[in-house]
Amino acid sequence: MSLAVAGVAAFVPSPATAAEPDPVIGGAVFNNPAGAVTAQYAIYQQLARIIDRVPAGETIRMSWLDFSNPVAAGEADTAERPNLVERLKAAHQRGVNVQIILNYGSYDDDAGKRFYPGLALAGELGTDVAASSFLMFCRDKTGCIAKQPSYGVLAYNHNKFLLASRVVLNGGASVSNVTFQSSGNLTVWDAETAFNNSITWSEASSYANYVTYFNDQKRYGPLATGDEDYYHVGSTNDMYKTHFFPRAATDGNPGQTSTDTMISVLNSVTCSYKGASDGLTHQTDVRVVIWGFSRTELAKKLASLAKAGCWVDVVYAGGPSDDPYKYTSENVVNALKAGGANVGLHSCAVSFNGRALKPHSKYTLIDGQYDDDQIPRVFTGSANYTFSSLRGADETIVRVRSADIHRQYLTNFYKVRDTCSGKIPPS
């Protein structure tokens, strides 16, 4: 990535910006709920470091399911635990255009009390979507684009991304077209109890795709009718290939396999291949960390790859003792078990300091033969492997084609899997 020095004079760093390291661009950031505060809030820190470095006249766009932290005004804003409301307000006050779209569930709680972030940011930014800055909520009980329920689940905006048109790093270099994509919501639980991932990059084409999607969310958001077959896919040539949802089934069956994006991904996997560098026979490895998993046909596809010689390793969030299949269905678990000895299967709910630590990430790693090459891939984003995520929600999946980023995710996979299996203690 080349960094061009441009427009530095327009940026006046805040004290926090000057004191804190630059954000990671072109790599992943993971939190660790079993770590110290700095490790728990690592994804918050990454977000804050992006927000702080956007200069006047540029634009921040955010779309999120849940933004409910901090819970009240006056909470501290520190390098270790950033107050993102304060960082966003500061960005707006220095002349940045700040545009935020939130799911209806971030408006108020069950008792009708407004959540502080939405209340504070509406006061700062206003709510006129025709303005250069605004806060907008999707309509009650729908997504912004997805409007129809799926298997009885109301439509929702499940996205978790931030776009920055330009950031200026501590040394003065300017980076344009910055995209941040995460699995985590902006809640205390997501930092202190859940394993989450995020990735940040600069690529003009995929950034433009996200901007189009964001603007479509803004356009459809106030309307009663959305687009249940919105599905937009970026260029295969991009390092970061985008997939935006909802995606409709062509036959009316939510379980239709031909329109299940992740089944299509796995259809491109070859389990046994000759290594391009050594000429030896290798197996392809497919690894999954997931929160919600109910699409049985997708589980069957993973099992079929295991039977064909792939190694398939799945870590999923375990439910409470009285409802162990709350997040991943029993049918999915049984389908995965049918894959035989080449399937590793790990239900995760690790007891730690009064909390049950669970994976909230949503990623699949592929290391081996994929289509006509052997470049490792990461598929990550906001989408669980549920019917509603595919058919009835505003969601994003990004495919990253990169050996280096795959290595970063693989390290995280081993950390999460081995913590969940009890091989290593939470730390």
Image: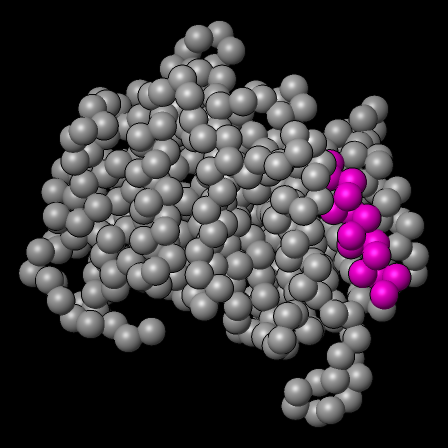
| Extreme-bottom residue of the structure | 278
Q: Is residue 311 part of the magenta span, yes or no?
A: no
**9, above or below 74, in the image:** below
The picture places residue 202, in percent across and down from the top left corner, at: 34, 63
Q: Quadrant of the C terminus?
A: bottom right
Horizontal side, residue 112 vs residue 172: left or right: right
Q: Quadrant of residue 273?
A: bottom right
Q: Quadrant of the N terminus?
A: bottom left
Q: Is residue 307 part of the magenta span, yes or no?
A: yes
The picture places residue 318, in percent across and down from the top left corner, at: 76, 38
The coloring applied to the image is one colour
183 or 339: which is nearer to us? 339
In this rendering, does residue 149 appear at all? yes
Horizontal side, residue 174 vs residue 66: left or right: left
> What is the number of callouts on the image?
0
The picture places residue 283, in percent across and down from the top left corner, at: 78, 74
In this rendering, does residue 395 appear at all? no
Q: Identify the residue at image location x=83%, y=24%.
A: 322
Q: Identify the residue at image location x=73%, y=55%.
A: 417
235 or 48: which is nearer to us? 235
Q: Identify the residue at image location x=37%, y=48%.
A: 210
**SS majority, magenta:** helix
Task: State which region is magenta.
Answer: 290-308
| Extreme-top residue of the structure | 111
**114, above or below 265, in the image:** above
**25, above or below 212, in the image:** below
| Extreme-front residue of the structure | 251
369 or 226: which is nearer to us? 226
Q: Quadrant of residue 72?
A: top left
Q: Identify the residue at image location x=43%, y=65%.
A: 238
